[in-house]
């Protein structure tokens, strides 16, 4: 096994890097899209239920099917996978943005208004920081699932660690499959831990709880 | 040509509705694989989740960690690994589908039961209900919205994974996709994908209906989507 | 100065929270809004900083209609303290206090210095500055809330049931802190509470509300106790208002007798010769009281024995002549086995005792003169605590 790894190291590294991109970028884009939508949904209650329905439906679509649906528009490229996974990430992160903002204690919001905070400043300096733990939790799910789902993209030829699965299947070579599985899981775990560290760094007040 | 036009053309071709490997057959096959896996997973996960949620304690922490681990596992890789070792048999697809379908059900059931208001639990015990009665008459009905969310999440997941399992030879709607990709026939690929999407949405609708029927009117609320 | 002119708050479903309210809060005074749940007191308070907008009527702050001012600007000039504190969990104590100064453009360093000054002002240790709110006790958090409200030195302070969420001991300490702060700072304070005792203790003026937003009586606390406007007010104020009213009457000119007071080294014979049913035994050197001796029991002792040998009943408590109120004196008399209150000076030295008759005379004199401090010159030894101008904290 190890000799094979040694020989194909550069290729493995390349695939890992691809998979990482295909996992992290959608989550980041998903966050960027979720924030404004979530802020609107937290403020204007009527907005959220229809948005949530759309999100539930999109999330139900199997990843492979969504990749395929996007092929005519974006081709057999990374973009297709990234757009599809961004949609899924959004489905996971948006509810957390809303939940996080709604969980800010009413007394805190009231005190902020009473002290003369304008809406935007209050959002940026009080509400979002307090919603951070919940938002990061959503981001973690987004990143981990994206890393895992990115491997399915291999079925439409988009390069990722999924290549090791397909190739291993075709050659009946379990070693490759093991390595692929291991790397995907480790990659997901590492990203998860990085995000936990980020959350700790952003929420010093929780550390002394 | 757009995705829909490809798919629509293919689906409306009469030939695809007859013979072996026809659309109706694969739809039924897909439903069969998905349904069976979900059923077995539910039979294992629901009682386990209820028991753990009722008892509380350390086990609930373990359950939460299972959720995180579960999402990291690439289903394609797992299916392929099993296929390489076990060849292609019922176990090759059933085992991973069941095992992977368990966590969402387990977690949501556990959360649902554990989240029952302690005051309500207390009242149930106080009126002299046996443990069985407390669980069946009070805790499970209250936890029903979350239990259904867990089952729905699993159902969607199983439908998706069964699609991918076509790569290791499983029948069902995935066949149209995988075979179509292999032979460069985008029509079949698109058609299969559209059918899977429709199926998934039907599953959603089915669960919405079940929720309306099974959840007591006083409890309609949003559960946690995985 | 804050004025309410025919202010009404009506909600879309028809509920009237505040009904045509006319109220004037004098500058530099504490007005307490008190009443049952749903009487509109909190709604009225929150209309002052425009957290709620009135349906009709005008509210003026120093003559200007607040509706004409920018809400955020208005609020930065008004301190606001609420029951749940609303401290920002993600900021340190000093950054919480520094909120409004920073908001109005102060450099952070200067704002933090100001925050630390305020920590001392509200009676908290400087060491708490870098802690987070959840690391503080309930009482400490409330003090931080008050410090935060005072940080930008606003002329007006609004307080919505600020002390309701803490236990009675902490609450009493916080109320005392508020009184001493007010004596020093002289802010215009509007405080909402459902506790009539708090209103009486803390308020210069008390506005008692009826259900559904109508004002029942607006008066200083003594007047509320002495002359409630109607049965509703009397009922709300409580059945023992007669005795509680005595908290506002000083004991400065109370007549005291010294007949029963004897040092412990006096003889039993001398004590019996005084002809009193009870003798107060004092310490020969310090003059502080030790206890009451029953004359009947004394008769059983040899005539030349010192009083110190007699068994003495405990005093209950004493009252400080001049500084304490008639209520404290009355309570001391009730607790005393002799039915007489022991009056001491600032050092605890016995000045004399007051019987129920003497107390009754003092009460009637206060009623007749219709002034709280009916008595003449303060007793020099015992009234070092009389503050200039402001309210004292009478010991009840």
Image (tube, helix red, strand yellow):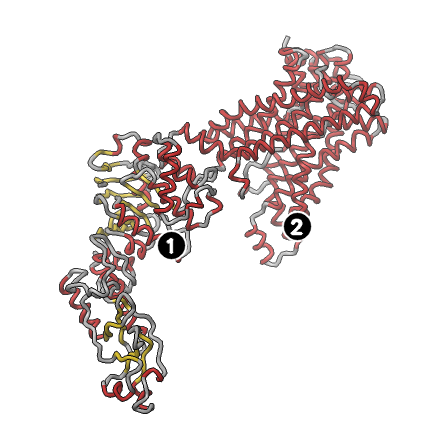
x, y (%) of residue A68? 67, 16
Give residue C291's mark: none
- Name the residue: 46% across, 38% down: C91
* Residue sitting nearer the eye, A105 or B215: A105
Which residue in the rendered view is the most extreme toward the top?
B1
Characterize the local packing of mark 1: few (<14), some (14-19) or many (20 or more) Cα atoms within 10 angstroms. some
Q: Chain of mark 2?
A: B
Q: Nearer the viewer, residue B53 or C135?
A: C135
Secondary structure, mark 1, is helix
Left or right of residue C38, residue B158 in this image:
right
Taking the image as drawn, is residue A79 in sight? yes
Residue C171 badge: 1
| Quadrant assignment, res B94 | top right
Asked if one can make out residue C16 in the rendered structure from this viewpoint, the answer is no
Q: Nearer the viewer, residue C130 or B120?
A: C130
C291 relative to A136, above or below: below
Taking the spot 26% from the left edge, 64% from the top edge, the residue there is C324
Q: Which chain hosts label 1?
A: C
Determine the image quadrant of residue A156: top right
As drawn, which residue projects farthest toward the left?
C369
Number of the front mark, 2 or 1 = 1
Image position, residue C104 (x, y; %): 34, 31
Distance from the alpha carbon under mark 2 to that under mark 1: 40 Å
Residue linked to disc 2:
B55
Q: Is residue A26 above or below residue A129?
A: above
Rendering quarter of residue C157: top left
Q: In which quadrant of the rendered image does the C terminus of chain A lie?
A: top right
Of residues C188 and C266, the one nearer the viewer is C266
Whether residue B174 sits left or right of residue B218 in the image: it is right
């Amino acid at each position: 096994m190890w000799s094979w790894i040694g020989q194909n190291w550069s290729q493995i590294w390349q695939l890992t890097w691809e998979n990482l991109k295909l996992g992290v970028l959608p989550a980041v884009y998903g966050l960027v899209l979720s924030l404004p939508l979530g802020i609107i949904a937290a403020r204007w209650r009527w907005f959220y239920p229809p948005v949530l329905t759309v999100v539930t439906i999109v999330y139900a679509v199997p990843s492979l099917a969504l990749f395929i649906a996007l092929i005519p528009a974006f081709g057999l490229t990374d973009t297709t996978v990234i757009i599809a996974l961004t949609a899924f990430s959004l489905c996971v992160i948006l509810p957390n943005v809303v939940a996080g903002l709604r969980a800010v204690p009413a007394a805190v919001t009231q005190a902020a208004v009473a002290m003369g905070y304008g809406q935007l400043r209050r959002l940026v300096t009080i509400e979002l920081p307090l919603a951070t733990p919940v938002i990061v939790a959503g981001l973690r799910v987004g990143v981990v699932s994206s890393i895992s789902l990115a491997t399915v993209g291999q079925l439409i030829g988009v390069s990722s660690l999924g290549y090791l699965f397909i190739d291993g299947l075709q050659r009946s070579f379990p070693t490759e499959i093991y390595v692929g599985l291991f790397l995907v899981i480790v990659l997901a775990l590492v990203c998860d831990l990085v995000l936990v560290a980020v959350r700790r760094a952003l929420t010093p007040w929780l550390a002394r709880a | 040509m757009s995705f829909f036009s490809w798919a629509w053309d293919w689906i409306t071709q009469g030939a695809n509705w007859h013979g072996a490997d026809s659309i109706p057959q694969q739809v039924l096959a897909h439903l069969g694989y998905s349904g069976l896996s979900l059923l077995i997973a539910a039979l294992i996960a629901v009682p386990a989740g209820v028991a753990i949620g009722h008892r509380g304690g350390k086990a609930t922490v373990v359950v939460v960690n299972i959720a995180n681990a579960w999402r990291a596992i690439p289903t394609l890789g797992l299916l392929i690994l099993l296929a390489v070792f076990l060849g292609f048999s019922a176990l090759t697809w059933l085992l991973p589908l069941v095992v992977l379908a368990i966590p969402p059900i387990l977690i949501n059931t556990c959360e649902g039961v554990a989240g029952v208001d302690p005051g309500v639990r207390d009242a149930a015990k106080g009126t002299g209900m046996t443990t069985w009665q407390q669980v069946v008459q009070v805790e499970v009905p209250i936890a029903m919205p979350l239990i259904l969310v867990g089952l729905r999440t699993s159902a969607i997941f199983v439908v998706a994974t069964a699609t991918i399992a076509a790569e290791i030879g499983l029948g069902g709607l995935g066949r149209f996709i995988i075979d179509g990709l292999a032979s460069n026939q985008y029509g079949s690929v698109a058609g299969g994908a559209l059918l899977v999407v429709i199926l998934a949405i039907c599953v959603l609708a089915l669960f919405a209906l079940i929720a309306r029927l099974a959840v007591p009117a006083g409890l309609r609320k949003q559960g946690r989507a995985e | 100065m804050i004025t309410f002119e025919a202010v009404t708050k009506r909600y879309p479903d028809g509920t009237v929270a505040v009904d045509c309210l006319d109220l004037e809060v004098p500058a530099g005074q504490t007005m307490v809004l008190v009443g049952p749940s749903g009487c509109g007191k909190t709604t009225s308070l929150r209309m002052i900083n425009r957290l709620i907008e009135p349906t009709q009527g005008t509210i003026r702050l120093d003559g200007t209609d607040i509706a004409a001012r920018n809400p955020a600007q208005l609020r930065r000039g008004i301190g606001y303290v609420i029951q749940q504190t609303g401290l920002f969990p993600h900021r340190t104590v000093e950054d919480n206090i520094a909120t409004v100064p920073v908001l109005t453009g102060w450099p952070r360093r200067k704002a933090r210095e100001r925050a630390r000054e305020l920590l001392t002002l509200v009676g908290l240790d400087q060491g708490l500055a870098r802690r987070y709110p959840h690391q503080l006790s309930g009482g400490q958090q409330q003090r931080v809330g008050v410090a935060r409200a005072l940080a930008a030195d606003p002329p007006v302070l609004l307080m919505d049931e600020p002390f309701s969420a803490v236990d009675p001991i902490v609450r009493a300490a916080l109320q005392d802190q508020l009184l001493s702060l007010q004596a020093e700072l002289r802010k215009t304070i509007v405080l909402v509470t459902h506790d009539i005792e708090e209103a009486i203790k803390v308020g210069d003026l008390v506005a008692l509300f009826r259900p559904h937003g109508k004002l029942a009586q607006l008066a200083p606390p003594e007047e509320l106790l002495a002359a409630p406007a109607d049965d509703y007010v009397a009922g709300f104020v409580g059945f023992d208002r007669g005795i509680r009213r005595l908290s506002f009457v000083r004991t400065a000119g109370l007549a005291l007798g010294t007949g029963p007071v004897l040092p412990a080294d006096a003889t039993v014979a001398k004590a019996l010769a005084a002809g009193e049913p009870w003798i107060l035994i004092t310490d020969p050197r310090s003059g502080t009281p030790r206890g009451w001796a029953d004359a009947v029991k004394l008769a059983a002792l040899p005539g030349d024995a010192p009083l110190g040998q007699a068994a003495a009943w405990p005093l209950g408590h004493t009252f400080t002549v001049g500084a304490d109120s008639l209520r404290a004196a009355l309570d001391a008399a009730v607790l005393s086995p002799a039915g007489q209150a022991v009056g001491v000076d600032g050092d605890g030295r016995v000045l004399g005792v007051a019987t129920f008759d003497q107390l009754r005379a003092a009460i009637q004199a206060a009623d007749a003169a219709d002034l709280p401090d009916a008595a003449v010159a303060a007793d020099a030894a015992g009234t070092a605590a009389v503050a200039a101008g402001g309210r004292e904290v009478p010991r009840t």
